[in-house]
Image: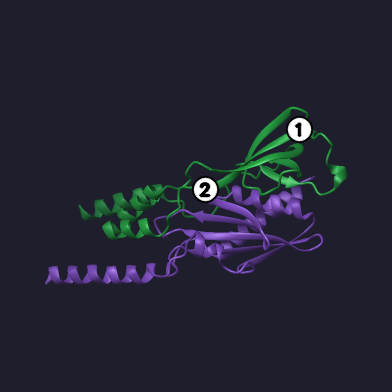
Chain colours: A green, B purple
């Protein structure tokens, strides 16, 4: 009986775990468009790892002590932050992009598609930035 | 006798946990580490492209990016790796900075949430995976 219980807990822990560091899929890095950053706003994204998940795993592994320990190791688990940018492509045409990149209003940027949020690359060379921006694809 | 042993084991577990958790790492402690702490990865080429590639490579790993910001030290990316059956999880930071024109260095620093934890992903493994991702992007990129 005890053995079954241990196996059951091990199976749950295994299912909840993501033990190995690995790539989610083949890397994507594709240019979408170029534009000028018009506005920037800090935002909080949806939780990627919740405190309750951690507490549950802590509890399954070590009982109440494990739950308390996991609950106290970090306060801000569920609040990843990023920035929401408005990118102006041409007159009166804005695109909204949410990204972990950190760029400034007025920067000319290339918006790059990845496997997750888009990435913004600042174009330093003035010749690389069309005055009004534009679609690449 | 068994009851006494169980009590003793529970007390011992509590002491071990309190000791282990007294050396906990979190996003705050990791973000306050010196910028050049960790494993340096060196890249040549456009700094902005490499900065983007580092971020894209990290986004493709099974980690959680928690925050990113530009400071005087460079572009900082804070991340966590979730708790698993064998570890309490990890916290980490990558600082990307232009060391000289056309030379970029990314310092990959991570720690177990509990410093005494034996298992889990180590700093050199994060560094290797990020390095692999950036190298792949730069090789495929025609930007």
Where residue A43 sits in the image (x, y, percent)? 56, 43
Which residue is rendered at x = 35% and y = 52% of the image? A55
> Which image quadrant is residue A89 in?
top right
Rendering quarter of residue B96: bottom right
Q: Chain of mark 2?
A: A
Q: Position of residue A81 (x, y in %)?
A: 55, 47
Q: Position of residue B117 (x, y in %)?
A: 42, 67
Instruction: Please state the chain letter of the residue tagged with numbered disc 1 in the rendered image.
Output: A
Q: Which residue is at 40% across, 60% downward?
A: A73
Q: Which residue is mark 2?
A: A80
Label 1 belongs to which residue? A89
Label 1 in the same subunit as label 2: yes
Q: How far separated are the C-alphas under marks 1 and 2?
A: 28 Å
> Are discs 1 and 2 less than 8 Å apart at CB?
no
In the rendered image, the residue lying farthest to the right is A127
Q: Secondary structure at mark 2?
A: loop
- Identify the residue at image location x=20%, y=52%: A1
* A8 to B24, vertically: above or below: above
How many other residues sit within 10 Å of disc 2, few (<14), some (14-19) or many (≥20)? many
């Amino acid at each position: 009986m005890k053995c079954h219980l241990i196996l059951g807990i091990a199976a749950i822990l295994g299912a909840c775990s993501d033990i190995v560091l690995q790539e989610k899929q083949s890397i994507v890095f594709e240019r979408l468009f170029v534009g000028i950053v018009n506005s920037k706003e800090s935002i909080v994204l949806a939780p990627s790892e919740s405190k309750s998940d951690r507490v549950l795993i802590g509890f399954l592994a070590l009982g109440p002590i494990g739950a308390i320990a996991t609950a106290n190791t970090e306060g801000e688990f569920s609040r990843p932050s990023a920035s929401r940018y408005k990118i102006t492509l041409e007159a009166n045409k804005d695109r909204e992009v949410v990204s972990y990149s950190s760029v400034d209003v007025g920067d000319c940027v290339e918006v790059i598609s990845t496997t997750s949020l888009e990435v913004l690359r600042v174009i330093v060379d003035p010749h690389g930035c069309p005055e009004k921006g534009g679609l690449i694809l | 006798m068994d009851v006494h042993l169980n009590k003793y084991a529970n007390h011992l577990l509590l002491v071990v946990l309190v000791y282990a958790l007294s050396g906990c790492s979190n996003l705050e402690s990791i973000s306050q580490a010196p910028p050049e702490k960790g494993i340096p990865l060196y890249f040549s080429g456009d700094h902005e492209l490499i900065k983007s590639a580092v971020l894209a490579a990290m986004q493709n790993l099974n980690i959680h990016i928690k925050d990113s910001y530009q400071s005087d030290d460079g572009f900082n990316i804070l991340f966590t790796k979730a708790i698993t059956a064998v570890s309490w999880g990890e916290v980490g930071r990558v600082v990307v900075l232009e060391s000289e024109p056309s030379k970029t260095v990314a310092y990959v620093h991570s720690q177990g949430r509990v410093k005494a934890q034996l298992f889990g992903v180590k700093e050199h493994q994060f560094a290797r995976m990020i390095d692999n991702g950036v190298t792949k992007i730069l090789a495929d990129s025609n930007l």
